[in-house]
Image (spheres, grey):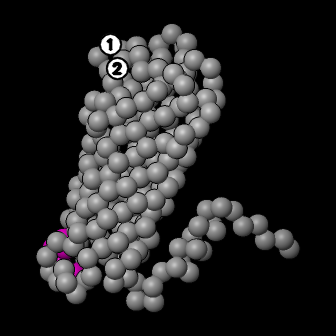
């Protein structure tokens, strides 16, 4: 019987193999805003830079200092604005990141700051009312930022995080949807729970 290993399975295996022997696992559901967006996509409502609600979650496995994280998030209505030329839109990200945190023994029971960065995919989709410039594509992207986690008990804590996301340069995949190569960047600020497993 042939065993098929999909990319998602391979990523999970690498995460498990790279986890330190005494690693701590955390699940972090969060909410926040995206803001400060800039894009070459045709932004009919001129709304890419406006603050928009964002929801997501991450899974972190971390040792004394270094950890690995998987992060997914979505922002509905990313390109929707007051002029209502865009019917619906969203931007979603899925990234794999390296986390470097203050050593646990130094943080003790206070906030534990960290820096984070990695690569992944950014899915960009929009549909305008005239169906003139519909677009849906997954682009390679990177992100970098930092935050802090503070535990209220042995299991539950709070997490604050700010990150910058940007697509990697690529060739335009569809004539007319962007001015030059398809590019999108924005900031994301979130607050959420952090739960030890």
Q: Position of residue 79 (x, y in %)?
A: 39, 26
Q: Quadrant of residue 172?
A: top right
Residue at the far bottom: name it: 21
Q: Secondary structure at mark 1?
A: loop
Give above or below for 45 relative to 114.
Answer: above
Where does the magenta region start and end?
Answer: 150-154
Q: Which mark is residue 9?
A: none
Give above or below for 149 relative to 182.
Answer: below
Residue at image location 62% in from the left, 20% down from the top: 175
Quadrant of image for the N terminus:
bottom right
Give above or below for 87 relative to 22.
Answer: above
Residue at image location 38% in from the left, 35% down from the top: 76
Please check the rendered image and state whether residue 43 is part of the magenta-colored stretch, yes or no. no
Mark 2 Cα-neighbour bin, 10 Å: few <14, some 14–19, many ≥20: some
Residue at the far top: name it: 130
Mark 1 Cα-neighbour bin, 10 Å: few <14, some 14–19, many ≥20: few
Of 66 and 126, the residue lying toward us:
66
Residue at image location 19% in from the left, 80% down from the top: 107
Q: Which mark is residue 46?
A: 2
Q: Quadrant of residue 83?
A: top left
Residue 194 in view, yes or no: yes
Q: Position of residue 125 (x, y in %)?
A: 50, 31
Q: Secondary structure at mark 2?
A: loop
Circle 2/circle 1 CB separation < 8 Å: yes
Q: Is residue 146 left or right of residue 94?
A: left
Q: Position of residue 142 (x, y in %)?
A: 46, 51
């Amino acid at each position: 019987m042939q065993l098929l290993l999909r990319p998602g399975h391979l990523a999970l295996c690498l995460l498990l193999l790279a986890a330190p022997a005494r690693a701590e696992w955390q699940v972090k559901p969060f909410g926040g805003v995206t803001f400060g967006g800039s894009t070459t996509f045709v932004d009919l409502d001129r709304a890419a830079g406006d603050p928009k609600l964002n929801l997501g979650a991450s899974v972190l496995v971390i040792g004394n200092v270094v950890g690995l994280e998987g992060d997914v998030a979505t922002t509905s209505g990313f390109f929707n604005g007051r002029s209502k030329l865009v019917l619906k839109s969203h931007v979603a990200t899925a990234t794999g990141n390296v986390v470097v945190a203050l050593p646990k023994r130094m943080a003790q029971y206070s906030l534990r700051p960290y820096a984070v960065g990695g690569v992944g995919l950014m899915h960009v989709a929009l549909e305008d009312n005239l169906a003139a410039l519909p677009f849906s594509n997954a682009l390679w992207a990177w992100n970098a930022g930092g935050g802090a986690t503070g535990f209220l008990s042995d299991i539950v804590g709070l997490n604050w995080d700010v990150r910058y996301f940007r697509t990697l340069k690529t060739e335009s995949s569809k004539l007319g949807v962007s001015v030059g190569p398809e590019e999108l960047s924005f900031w994301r600020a979130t607050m959420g729970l952090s739960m030890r497993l």
